[in-house]
Amino acid sequence: MASAQFSQYKDLIAEGDLALIWISRGNIKAVTIDAKETFNTRYGSFPHKDMIGKPYGSQIAIRTRGGTGRFSFVHVLQPTPELWTLSLPHRTQIVYTPDSSYIMQRLGCGPHTRVIEAGTGSGSFSHAFARTAGHLYSFEFHPVRYEQARLEFEEHGLLAENVTITHRDVCEDGFTIKKGDTTSQEFAEGGADSVDLNADLVFLDLPAPWDAIPHLDDVITKTDRAGVCCFSPCIEQVDKTIEALEKNGWSSIEMVEIQGRQYESRRQMVRSVEDAMQRCRDIKRRKVEGIEKKKRLIEQDRLDKENKDAAPRKREPLTEKSQFNPFGKGTRVKEGDPNFQWKQVTKIEAEIKSHTSYLTFAYKLVDKSRDEAAVQQYLDNLAA
Ligand code: SAM
């Protein structure tokens, strides 16, 4: 069923909606709401009918199995391109939000932009383009992937809005969409036999973008500047892509990579000199205790060996749990505990999570001539 849930906000969860169920970070599942169905997880079963009528974002709770009196819960969210990217069925490598958002921003993607994307792959970036662009022309040469993406775009209401998907090897056959092609494009009876793509933004996520680049002149805008981004995982591909871009008259070529890290706002305990002294004393005490304990164990082992028939050794009682130590081990203190002093700090993830490919950007202005009359008029106005 086609729905416009990716482009229009909804307040309430309704029968037939595509909803994303957030089970945990990194575990989001897409479901079509059906009052007769139940959403099963290893934490328990959530009947869809409990979700219907509730606002999107609601927490749905159930008692866990085994009568422990505990609750399990999930959150039901309205789909967005960002959440879809995290939950979609992977048919290929996909473009993630740190890259897609940067590419769209850098190439100025907006409600009037006409975008070409090849290949469609799992349709991750297609959903982000569809929300922002005027029209998206997506191309995929793998027949099964093309059909799956076409079906998914239809179900998500994208084909009815601003997306066209075409089954095509763009490296061999270029980007022009004609009557008779395997495409979601509909041709009106008696109308034009081909589509004027007039694209101002091109995104190529292909193994050999250099073979597709020469075909772009036929489909990019002739009156404005067109921008292209090629997404390539290795630097040798970037090299070949830049060569092809230069050869085909693209300029202002730049390559970037996105290294995304999460910034987290945290509270950190404010420590005094006395705390530091306490910590040093604590380390020293533990060290001495450890050495003593080791000595005792070695001695005990020696005695055990001497007397094999000796009664089983009694385990030493564990050392008393240390008092709170703000620098290290000891009683756990909850972040923000009002018994201690805290300051607000920023923590950055050590690991870079978002680099998947290099992004090569370039621009082309096909018609470099200028409207002399308009220029003269402008100069006259300045002089007046
Ligand atoms: N950007 C996509 C996303 O975010 O889901 C992923 C694209 S995936 C890495 C690359 C896709 O390009 C594959 O599905 C592959 O079948 C398709 N492809 C490769 N060569 C192609 C060509 N010459 N013409 C059209 N599609 C092609």
Image (cartoon, helix red, strand yellow):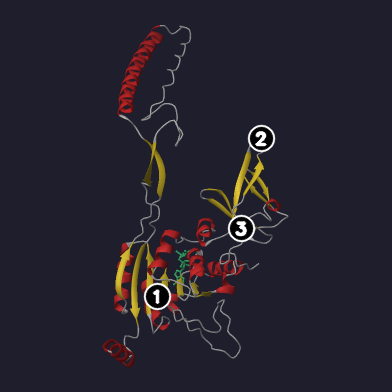
Q: CA distance from mark 3 to mark 1?
A: 37 Å
Looking at the rendered structure, the kind of residue marked 3 is Ala
Q: SS class of the residue under badge 1?
A: helix
Mark 1: few/some/many CA within 10 Å (<14, 14-19, 20+) = many
* Horizontal and vertical percent position of residue 332: 45, 30
Which residue does the image show at 32% across and 17% down from the upper left? 288
Q: Is residue 128 left or right of residue 367?
A: right
Mark number displayed over residue 19: 3
The residue carrying mark 1 is 212
Residue 342 falls in which quadrant of the image? top left
As drawn, the residue found furthest toward the right would be 36
Asked if residue 42 shows in the view, the reply is no
Q: Residue 84, can we see it?
A: yes
Disc 2 target residue: 69
How many numbered discs?
A: 3
Inspect the image, locate mark 2, and give the three-letter code of the amino acid beneath it.
Gly
Q: Residue at x 42, y 59 (%)?
A: 98
Could you tell me the amino acid type at mark 1?
Answer: Ala
